[in-house]
Image (spheres, rainbow, N blue to C red):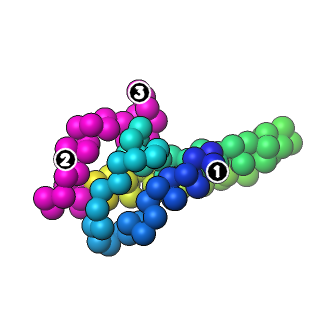
Amino acid sequence: ALAVYSWASVALAFKASNLTNRGIVSHGPYRLVRHPAYAAKNLAWWIGALPNLYLIFASGNLRHGAYALLSLCGWTAIYVLRAITEERHLLMGRNGYAEYMQRVRWRFIPRLL
């Protein structure tokens, strides 16, 4: 997951920006999904949390486990909403993003989501 995140970051180069459109990136992992960095970052968080979640639930501390799961779900939701917001923003301009969305159907996971 961290390798995919790094690959996506390198592919974005200096075009990464939440506030301005510096061009549409459609190479590297962006030719497979529209938000590979967000997907990879979230996957890394979930994989990293699994051992702790296991230990928390194995110890019988369901309350702490629930807090940990809610936290992970919350951060995942934030990044899903961030991706949707970015797409809406990019669709406002005549920059080729609508065409890119037609070429790259999947937002986070190829053939799934």
Callout 1 amino acid: Leu
Which is more toward the observer, 29 or 41? 29
Q: Are marks 1 and 2 in contact (CB under 8 Å)?
A: no
**Chain part drawn in magenta:** 88-113
Q: CA distance from mark 2 to mark 3?
A: 19 Å
Residue located beneath label 1 in the image:
2
Quick one: which residue is furthest to the top in this view?
Answer: 111
Q: Earlier in the sequence, mark 1 or mark 2?
A: 1
Residue located beneath label 3 in the image:
111
Where residue 73 sits in the image (x, y, percent)? 54, 48
Look at the numbered disc 3 and give the secondary structure of its residue: loop
Where residue 14 sits in the image (x, y, percent)? 42, 69
Quick one: which residue is furthest to the left in this view?
Answer: 94
Look at the numbered disc 2 and give the secondary structure of its residue: helix
Residue located beneath label 2 in the image:
98
Where residue 71 sits in the image (x, y, percent)? 60, 55
Q: CA distance from mark 1 to mark 2?
A: 28 Å
Q: Residues within 10 Å of mark 1 (few under 14, many from 20)?
A: some
Look at the numbered disc 1 and give the secondary structure of its residue: helix
Quick one: which residue is furthest to the right in this view?
Answer: 59
From the viewer's perspective, is 67 left or right of 87? right
Q: Is residue 112 above or below residue 70?
A: above
